[in-house]
Amino acid sequence: MKKVLGMGEIMVQFNPTEKGPLLYQRMFERHVAGSEANIIIQMQKLDVKTSFFTAVGSDPFGEIIINTLREEGVETNLVKIDEGNPTGIYFVQRSYPYPGKTTVFYYRENSAASKITCDDIKEEVFEDVDMLIISGITPALNESVRNCALKIVEMSKSRGIKVVFDTNIRIKLLKNKEKALECVQPFLEKADIVFTGMGDLNFLFKGEFEDKKNQLKELAKNTEIMVIKMGEKGAIALYDGHTYKQDSFKVPVVDELGAGDAFDGAFLASILKGYDVKTALKYGCAAGAITVSLKGDIEPLPKWNDLKLFLDIHSS
Ligand code: CKP
Ligand code: MG
């Protein structure tokens, strides 16, 4: 195994110490998060070698992001420092208006990561890489990042690098179904492994669950493994003509953000370790459950020992 490369925006997250409306929050914890970075860090915690391609501002938030990646063991030589644009940040509102549900408020327009262009892609990006992780958030940032994301995917494919895509539709970035479909379609067509969630499936397609699943399969024709995350209902994986299912693990929900990414990271690390799809689903669901029970996307991400302990306690 060489290394896994992530591409996307990493932001500083401000997460209130209390649940409830953001309007009344006065105290915040500072975290670092971003879908692809969360996946990469989960994989790194599960002994996979990783690297990240992004840009941050020449500001303290950018420094915090680079320090965080380094502390977690992720290679940072592909992180560009943009002198002219700031690091993106966002605020989180937990358990309001619906208990257990989290809302995000982005301040990421014109951020350093949103200014990445195809010119930033150099051959060194692909050095020693055998898997690329990208999500629907990245092409949703703007056209230039979208082109860059597509180019990275195409260049990866032509170098025999496996492409992993999580649809991760963000309505705040994409506005409507047509835009969302247009954004994810070229990535679905090229990905070797696809992750999606029930929210994304419901947003993108019409009909019963089976119809939606078939419409997704139709788009993602070349996919080897397709995983549908169903939150409290667990997850299913479609692989080699079979459907595998895993129930979720019931835990108290503190902050649901990042659970999908924890799932992806643990699932992929399991596959790379040689586990079968059924076992990978179990580790994915366990990592997701561990992540929702704490604030922050990165801090709760488990190592192999934590996953095994969680599963032991759960089955005892
Ligand atoms: O799908 P997830 O809940 O695992 O993703 C959460 C992250 O990148 C979130 O923390 C934020 O950093 C983001 O997705 C985003 O841009 O919404
Ligand atoms: Mg997700």
Image (tube, rainbow, N blue to C red):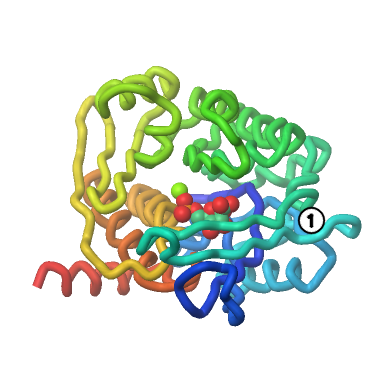
Q: Is residue 115 above or below residue 212?
A: below
Looking at the picture, how far across and down is residue 217, in whole percent? 36, 23
Q: Locate residue 3, reporting x and y percent.
A: 54, 52
- In the image, is residue 135 above or below residue 49? above
Badge 1 element: strand
Of residues 260 and 93, the one nearer the viewer is: 93
Camera-side residue of 99 and 281: 99
Residue 203, quarter of the rendered image: top left
Residue at 51 percent of width and 79 percent of height:
17
- For the question of whether residue 50 can be seen, the reply is no
- The answer to whether residue 237 is left or right of residue 31 is left
Residue at image position (49%, 31%) is 191
The C terminus - image quarter: bottom left
Pointer 1: residues within 10 angstroms few (<14), some, or many (20+)?
some
Residue, disc 1: 80
Q: Residue at x 69, y 31 (%)?
A: 151
| 220 left or right of 79 in image | left
**Measured from the top left, where is residue 313 in percent x and y?**
17, 74
